[in-house]
Amino acid sequence: MHNGQLYIALPVFLLLMVPVCSYSDPYEQDEWAYVSMPEETYYYSDDSSSTIETYNPPREHRSAQRSHESQQFIDTDSTEDRPRRTTSSPPRHTKPSVFTRLPEQISPPGERLIIINPHAHAWGAYSPNGSLVRQGLATSGGNWCDDIDRPCRTRVGSFRITSLGDEDCVSTIYPVGEGGAPMPYCMFFNGGQALHGSNGVVDGNVSHGCVRMRVRDAEWLRYNFADVGTRVVVQPY
């Protein structure tokens, strides 16, 4: 070999002996997001414990997994099978406020008057000139009482208060065979039927014939409005 050929071949030979270093841009790879991650890939943390769930799928399965997860997201986000939302809601049938169930003004009765309206489940106290002084929720007698096996509606009509009691007033009949049911601030107007306070006042008619009202209302009515002889009118059901 001539010296000139040796000088030409030597650089080629040395070039073949040097390792070839190639640069690979991780952002040009399909799964570039995994390139800079540590050995274990953290997916989520379970808030209910101090451990962290980890999973490091084989690289050949990552593309398929990503594709599957993307399809799941698309399917979940689809609106075809979702129930349609409506902007309107069914009409709600609610009873008027207990403070608006009776008229503010009636024909002047010429005397203090207590009106019981079983249909509206309300009571009202009216001044002699017919102005409403106070009103509230009232529970009148029910259509039927199982424990006495007969109807137990409050008698409809016009009456007068015959006797008044205080906070210690109790029934002599109910519970049946025992008596002793609390009737605080009782105001009897028709035999054993009375206006009285109760913790069992409901927006309906379920009593044994008395007219239940809230205890604070009965106390007010007893000491600030009613007296023996005060007129009580029970309107039709």
Image (spheres, rainbow, N blue to C red):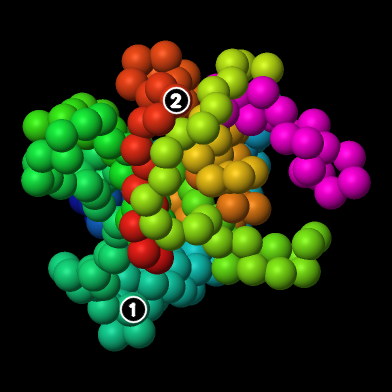
Left or right of 211 in this view: 95: left
Q: Nearer the viewer, residue 167 or 187?
A: 187
What is the x, y in percent for residue 59?
53, 61
Magenta span includes 214 = no
Magenta span includes 184 = yes
Question: Does label 2 or label 1 sit earlier along the sequence?
Answer: 1
Q: Nearer the viewer, residue 32 or 23?
A: 32
Left or right of 226 in this view: 103: left
Q: Give the range drawn in magenta.
A: 169-186
How far apart are the alpha carbons under marks 2 and 1?
68 Å
Which of the 4 image quarters holds residue 182?
A: top right
Q: In which quarter of the image is the N terminus?
A: bottom left
Q: Residue at x 42, y 45 (%)?
A: 159
- Report which residue position mark 1 lands on: 82
Label 2 residue SS: loop
35 relative to 153, above or below:
above
